[in-house]
Amino acid sequence: MNITLTRHPAKVEAAPHIVLIHGMGSAATAWKPLTPHLLDHFNVITLDLPGHGASEFTKGQAMDPTSVAEQVVRQIEKEFEISNFDLVGNSWGGWIALEIAANFPEKISSVTALAPAGFWLASYVQRAPGTAALQFLAKNSALLAPNYLKFEWARKLGFEDVSPHWRRFSYELCLDATMAMAKSPGYFPAWDGMLSKRFDSQIDQNIPVKIIFGDSDNTLPATTCQERAMAPAHSQWITIAQCGHAPMWDNVETVASHILEIAGIKR
């Protein structure tokens, strides 16, 4: 299985595990801002999905959220022999996290889905407009990105539509995100794996679920991609003010608090 896993040890012994799943065109590096907030309580596992980050892409492999969800669980079992863990996912990774909870309920303690894909009013039958442009821009600017991203105009070009707080983003965050997008051969297969599909799986009501969107999400806007009726009936739906498509970048402490709360951990 071509999923690269990295375990970040907790600061305490015998801590539970939490798995963080990135979005399409992203990588494990997307979780750098959040990970330090979790290590007091969790062993944190980050991963690179097929064709993303350090993971290769095998032509023809299944990239729909349900198939990738199974890959993730099998790889975690193989490498860490973990029987139970909490889950956090963003965007495409949020959908995958929800599918893991639906299909492997005995393994999951809680799910926090940050701006999850799959909650659209009408399923996509073709790639969203601008999809190719995003990767084209990242791929063709990759060599120059380390220098260009030192300038505010370059960070604005790449991240203004992602977050209302793009000016606060560090150089490292912007560079990591740009390089992840540029080097993601699984990007278009992931998109194609979502076509004609929506999240419609059932999650056991004994698994706590939080669905968190930002009120300024331009990638999956409320008007077309945040259908609450599709969420598990027992889930909490939370909207964070002044927040874009990556809540773990815009409101990291708020997101961390929600994760600890749903996992039943008191600070």
Image: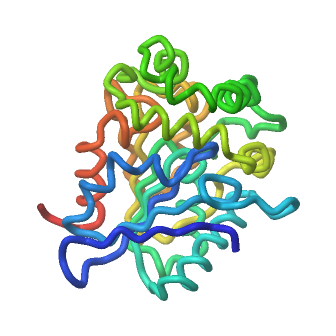
What is the count of numbered marks? 0
Residue at 67% of width from left, 27% of height from top? 134
Q: In the shown orientation, is residue 166 left or right of residue 28? A: left
Residue at 47% of width from left, 80% of height from top? 107
Residue at 32% of width from left, 27% of height from top? 241
Residue 108 lies, in percent from the top left, at 45, 74
Tell me which corner region of the image, top left, top right, bottom left or bottom right, holds residue 38.
bottom left
Viewer-closest of 32 and 212: 32
Q: Residue 127, relative to residue 163: is it above or below?
A: below
Q: In the shown orientation, is residue 10 left or right of residue 232? A: left
Residue at 24% of width from left, 59% of height from top? 261
Residue 10 lies, in percent from the top left, at 26, 71
Q: Residue 68, relative to residue 244: is it above or below?
A: below
Residue at the farthest left position: 267
Q: Residue 255, relative to residue 111: is it above or below?
A: above
Viewer-closest of 23 and 66: 23
Residue 105 lies, in percent from the top left, at 51, 77
